[in-house]
Amino acid sequence: MRHVTKSITTTAIGGLLLAALAVPGIGGASTSSSGLTYQVSPIAIPAGHATSGFPYTPNQCVTLFGLACYTPVILHDAYQIPWTVNGSLAGTGTQVAIIDAYGSPTVQQDLNVYDQTFGLPATTVHVFYPEGKVTYNVHQAGWAEETSLDVQTVHDLAPGAKINLVVASSPGGNDINNAIAFAVNNHLGNVLSMSFGAPEAAIGGGGNNLQVQQAHAIFQQATSQGMSLFASSGDSGAGNGYTSPNALYPASDPQVVATGGTDLFVSGNGRYTWKSETVWNDANPATCPFGCDYAKTPFGATGGAPSSIFPAPSWQTSTMRTTSDVAFNSGVYTATMIYLGFLGGNNNGFYFFGGTSEASPSWAAITADLVQARGSDFGQFAPTLYGIAAQPRTYAKDFHDITFGNNAFPPSSGFAAGAGYDLPTGLGTPIVSGLMATLAPSATLGYTAP
């Protein structure tokens, strides 16, 4: 396996692959009141393409690359995510809907390689194109990366769940809304993940935007039918690319659980335990991991900010709705490993992935496991999570409370983590064994990988 170079290229295939989540430019022009375009930001760094010696341990990866490399077993161990529930693979009997634009031409093949490499049971991705399949081209690479990240993450953390990938014909608001409505109307998920967004500052008309209003109505229908919704808080700090903090949409919709990001640190070799977590922010020298010496410029930082569109729901004490609600490992230096097979030739291979694009499908998959254990859907899930956090006993055993770091990221100020709820990481990251005991106390859990 070759060493990753220390120089960063922002668009070159085979170097760092970046698809900006925030609207390019500081204070960029707003969309029209009828137009909304979503973007994604999976951050992918090549891990080399030789198969000998892979997968490495996190410490080996830090030595070789300056980045950790988290595999399925590590994430299951660290967050105490069961492999089996009541004797069946975690997620069995549930469906996870994933919404992406354009899709990936190799999504099934990439998942097959991922499963074979990490010893996961094989599964079939069910792909739907409500408005027809779009021919792949290189300009869609960011969405194809996102698709592979979403699918492989869900299968990792809910290996028994049925994966329904609903592909929009474009990242435009109408097409994304149509894809979400298709998933809702056809009951394609107990849970649904959206690893994309637009800064509220870029939404023309704010709460009067027709596409936002349409999406909100679809979200209300989804949760009323029992579906739980998740979306990423963003990867450019509290400002999401703007000079002042603003929330990312659709994570800011109260029907949706907004997922922020952390840097996860583990102990062990072969089997692992949670050691600590900080707010993901590569611009903060106090929290950027492992000497922060891979990139000359910071990769990013978790979103999390007050909404300018939605008032606070009953379970939040602020005036306006705030994001994040919860968090999951999303740091680039504490990366998850994902396989990409659509780049061609020597560019195909495993990549270090980061961004809150990981947090949304992770929480969706964990919730699918909880649905299986409980035997029923949750619907709008945030009130349940905030209810758990309101009780000190359950909060302490069900969440890692992230108390160190902030999401101030140029050009915007940000917010500090602290005890209990905070905007960068919400209620914190999951201790899934605790959540299982609280929400499905009669479930039998197994922690041995298949």
Image: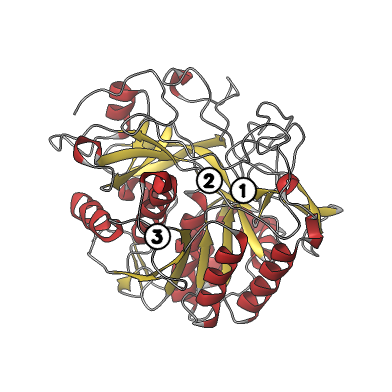
Mark 2 Cα-neighbour bin, 10 Å: few <14, some 14–19, many ≥20: many
In 3D space, how far apart are the residues under numbered discs 2 and 1 (Cα atoms)? Answer: 7 Å
Q: Secondary structure at mark 1?
A: loop
Residue 183, image x, y percentages = 50, 75
Instruction: Name the residue at 23% across, 32% down.
Output: 48
* Image quadrant containing the C terminus: bottom left
What kind of residue is marked 2? Thr
- Above or below for 190 versus 145: below
Mark 1 Cα-neighbour bin, 10 Å: few <14, some 14–19, many ≥20: many
Instruction: Give the labeled residue for mark 2.
Output: 356
In 3D space, how far apart are the residues under numbered discs 3 and 2 (Cα atoms)? Answer: 14 Å
Instruction: Give the labeled residue for mark 1.
Output: 233
* Image quadrant containing the N terminus: top left
- Above or below for 269 versus 120: above
What kind of residue is marked 3? Val
Q: Is residue 254 visible?
A: no
- Taking depth in this image into account, of 325 and 14 the one nearest to the observer is 14
Q: Are marks 2 and 1 in contact (CB under 8 Å)?
A: yes
Name the quadrant containing residue 174.
bottom right
In 3D space, how far apart are the residues under numbered discs 1 and 3 (Cα atoms)? Answer: 18 Å
What kind of residue is marked 1? Ser
- Above or below for 87 versus 141: below
Q: Which label's residue is closer to the chain start, 2 or 1?
A: 1
Instruction: Give the labeled residue for mark 3.
Output: 154
The dot on residue 43 is none
Instruction: Name the residue at 73% across, 51% down.
Output: 203
